[in-house]
Image (cartoon, rainbow, N blue to C red):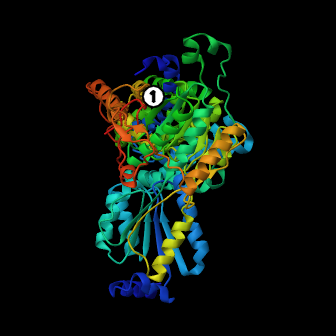
């Protein structure tokens, strides 16, 4: 035990990180920092599935470690530092709020590779960012929601007002409005990624106020349970399939599939070919999966949804295609124009028709 | 903005449901602190109660048995705290924090195979027909039994502390344990019983979240309610009715802010989100302007020396 620790520290001190571990003398150590518990049934659960896939793929050649329930902010910096000190070669930090801590720690450990999910800051050559185009899945949800709502009121549980979440709201709204011009969105911000009681309260409030479709951008299955209890309310699985609530209230889902990416990046570290980059994949690349559309959805709607999925996957359709205006009426996209990634990544406005203000 | 979307009757009913877990945990902690013990493990006992109640309710099919199990689960965990602080004379703050960490870990271990399972439903309106009376029906009669039990515990705690010999002894132990000991009262035994009561109440509060309010099991699902309950006891100046007021205020404004957001009221969401904390603190601070103070022996270790 002591001897291996000594060897590991010696190796680190000699700057033999990265590719040097691939010569078979040392396991590649991959760390994961999670914002919620691995049993949340949503976001963190799927990241952990990705971690398990890495273990399965490489067997004894890798060692994975994870820390769950890490608060965004200074606490996460401490956790990452500890992981790096413990000899991790590659660290995945899986929440938006880890963005600055990841870059801070990366500056201190130039030989350790860092991968930050859903962020955009790559201040050091050993930091990569990756995310999935969840908004493509939101477009499909919006379509189904717009077709299925009877009260024309769709509730949306927002976590934090960051571009990621705002993109999802816009994408869902655009596609709901397209098939149902009378549709109205009610948005509640709960300022948490994971708090089942608060999420349940928000869902109940939306339902009490007439919503018969509830979309969520939070990680637990509590809104599904609330919808089930209320009866007649449609929901969608978020981040994970949440299939235990199928076929109703959960009629479909967005599934994050991180496994291929995690395996590819771990392999890159082993090969010594890892370099900093930004990855943003969608349905086409398989990073965003659409969970089984249940029979509670009318057959024609299901068919349309699947057609949209195919078009999004092969790139023939973009979820943000003009003509679109911003909320204040100013033009956003002209007829046939599609939004570029830069605009999408920093999206901080609602599209025309959504009521209310984005908290600043 | 569309305030007509808010239904005041449903709002009040939701408020009472939101307040109940905090109320249960806080009234238990109040008794513990009145006995002179500071147990920071409320969160840990709540989550343990939540998972125990959930497991037993699922396996027996009876939410009532689940609640009993939750109370026992919370009490058993608090027994560990009682052992550490009353027998081993460990530091109460450290032991309480450890209890929270331990409870969170233990509960996620116990709940591993219960993620995604639906618990049996408690009877929504056990009081029957009166719940159908317009307006006051849903507000007063339309709740599950735990809401009334919570109110009953508050009233009972108040009456016992104020009017009975038992309450007097408990307060004496909390105010000055040396004097109480000199008078021949069993300080440790009384404190242990108070800790058990606190654990049972916290367990009930946790199970209210996992069996009624959410209802499902998810790791870490109490998400800090125990800490709010702890703070509430202090701001309520260790008085039962103020705990009730604080819990309802907190629950009410939490629900109100969600409703206002849903109705699209033009108040910045940040202010709405912080409003439950601020309003509850302000109101209770104003109320505590009288000469209320903490129990004299609160947090001090008692050792029967000399």
- Residue A210 visible in the picture: yes
Q: Position of residue B160 (x, y in %)?
A: 48, 26
Image-quadrant location for residue B234: top left
Front residue of B17/A322: it is A322
Image-quadrant location for residue A351: top left
Front residue of B286/A42: it is A42
Near mark 1 (Cα within 10 A), the count class, few <14, some 14-19 or many ≥20, is: many
Q: Position of A106 compared to B167: left or right?
A: left
Q: Position of residue B187 (x, y in %)?
A: 44, 43
List the single residue furthest toward the top: B134
Question: Against B38, is A47 above or below?
Answer: below
Please identify the quadrant where the N terminus of chain B is shown: top left
Q: Position of residue A121 (x, y in %)?
A: 33, 60
In the structure shown, which secondary structural element does the residue marked by tag 1 occupy? helix
Q: Position of B15 compared to B175: left or right?
A: right
Question: Against B46, is A25 above or below?
Answer: below
List the single residue furthest toward the front: A335
Front residue of B15/A286: it is A286
Question: Against A88, is A323 above or below?
Answer: above
Q: How many marks?
A: 1
Task: Identify the chain of the residue marked 1, using the numbered disc in the image.
Answer: B
Q: Position of residue A5 (x, y in %)?
A: 42, 83
Front residue of A28/A251: it is A251
The residue pinned by badge 1 equals B262
Residue at the spot x=58%, y=24% of the render? A151
- Residue A25 visible in the picture: no
């Amino acid at each position: 035990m002591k001897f291996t620790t000594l060897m590991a520290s010696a190796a680190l001190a000699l700057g033999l990180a990265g590719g040097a571990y691939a010569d078979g003398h040392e396991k590649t150590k991959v760390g994961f920092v999670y914002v919620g518990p691995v049993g949340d049934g949503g976001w963190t659960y799927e990241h952990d599935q990705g971690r398990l896939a890495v273990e399965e793929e490489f067997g004894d050649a890798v060692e994975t470690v994870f820390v769950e329930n890490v608060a965004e902010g200074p606490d996460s910096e401490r956790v990452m530092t500890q992981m790096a000190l413990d000899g991790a070669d590659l660290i995945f930090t899986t929440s938006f709020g880890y963005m600055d801590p990841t870059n801070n720690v990366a500056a201190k450990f130039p030989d350790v590779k860092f991968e930050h999910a859903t962020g955009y800051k790559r201040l050091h050559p050993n930091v990569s960012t990756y995310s999935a185009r969840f908004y493509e899945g939101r477009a499909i949800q919006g379509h189904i929601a717009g077709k299925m709502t009877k009260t024309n009121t769709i509730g949306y549980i927002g976590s934090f007002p960051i571009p990621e979440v705002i993109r999802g709201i816009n994408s869902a709204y655009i596609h709901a409005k397209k098939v149902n011009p009378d549709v109205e969105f009610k948005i509640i911000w709960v300022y948490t990624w994971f708090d089942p009681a608060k999420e349940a309260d928000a869902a109940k409030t939306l339902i009490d106020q007439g919503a018969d479709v509830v979309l969520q951008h939070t990680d637990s299955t509590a809104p599904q349970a609330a919808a089930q209890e209320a009866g007649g309310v449609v929901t969608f699985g978020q981040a994970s399939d949440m299939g235990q609530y199928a076929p109703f209230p959960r009629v479909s889902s967005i599934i994050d599939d991180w496994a291929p990416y995690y395996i590819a990046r771990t392999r890159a570290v082993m090969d010594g070919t890892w370099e900093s980059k930004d990855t943003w994949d969608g349905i086409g690349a398989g990073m965003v999966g659409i969970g089984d559309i249940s029979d509670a959805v009318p057959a024609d709607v299901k068919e349309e949804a699947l057609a949209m999925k195919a078009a999004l996957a092969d790139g023939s359709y973009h979820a943000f295609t003009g003509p679109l205006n911003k909320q204040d009426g100013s033009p956003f996209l002209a007829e046939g124009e599609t939004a570029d990634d830069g605009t999408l990544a920093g999206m901080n406005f609602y599209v025309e028709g959504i009521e209310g203000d984005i908290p600043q | 903005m569309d305030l007509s979307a808010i239904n005041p009757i449903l709002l009040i009913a939701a408020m009472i449901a939101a307040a109940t877990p905090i109320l249960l945990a806080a009234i238990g902690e109040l008794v513990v602190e009145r006995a002179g013990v500071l147990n920071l493990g409320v969160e840990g006992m709540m989550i343990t109660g939540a998972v125990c109640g959930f497991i037993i309710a699922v396996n027996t099919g009876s939410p009532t048995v689940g609640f009993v199990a939750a109370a026992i689960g919370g009490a058993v965990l608090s027994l560990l705290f009682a052992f550490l602080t009353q027998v081993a004379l460990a530091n109460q703050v450290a032991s309480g924090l450890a209890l929270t960490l331990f409870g969170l870990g233990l509960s996620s271990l116990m709940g591993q195979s219960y993620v995604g399972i639906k618990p049996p439903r408690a009877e929504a309106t056990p009081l029957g027909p009166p719940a159908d009376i317009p307006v006051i029906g849903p507000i007063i009669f339309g709740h599950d039994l735990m809401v009334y039990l919570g109110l009953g515990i508050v009233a009972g705690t108040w009456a016992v502390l104020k009017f009975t010999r038992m309450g007097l002894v408990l307060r004496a132990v909390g105010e000055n344990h040396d004097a109480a000991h000199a008078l021949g009262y069993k300080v440790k035994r009384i404190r242990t019983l108070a800790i058990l009561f606190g654990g049972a109440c916290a367990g009930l509060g946790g199970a209210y979240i996992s069996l009624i309010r959410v209802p499902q099991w998810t790791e870490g699902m109490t998400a800090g309610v125990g800490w709010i309950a702890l703070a509430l006891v202090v701001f309520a100046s260790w008085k039962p009715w103020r705990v009730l007021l604080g819990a309802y205020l907190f629950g009410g404004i939490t629900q109100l802010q969600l409703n206002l957001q849903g109705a699209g009221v033009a108040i910045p969401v940040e202010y709405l989100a912080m409003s439950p904390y601020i309003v509850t603190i302000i109101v209770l601070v104003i109320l505590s302007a009288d000469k209320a103070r903490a129990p004299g022996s609160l947090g001090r270790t008692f050792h029967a020396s000399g």
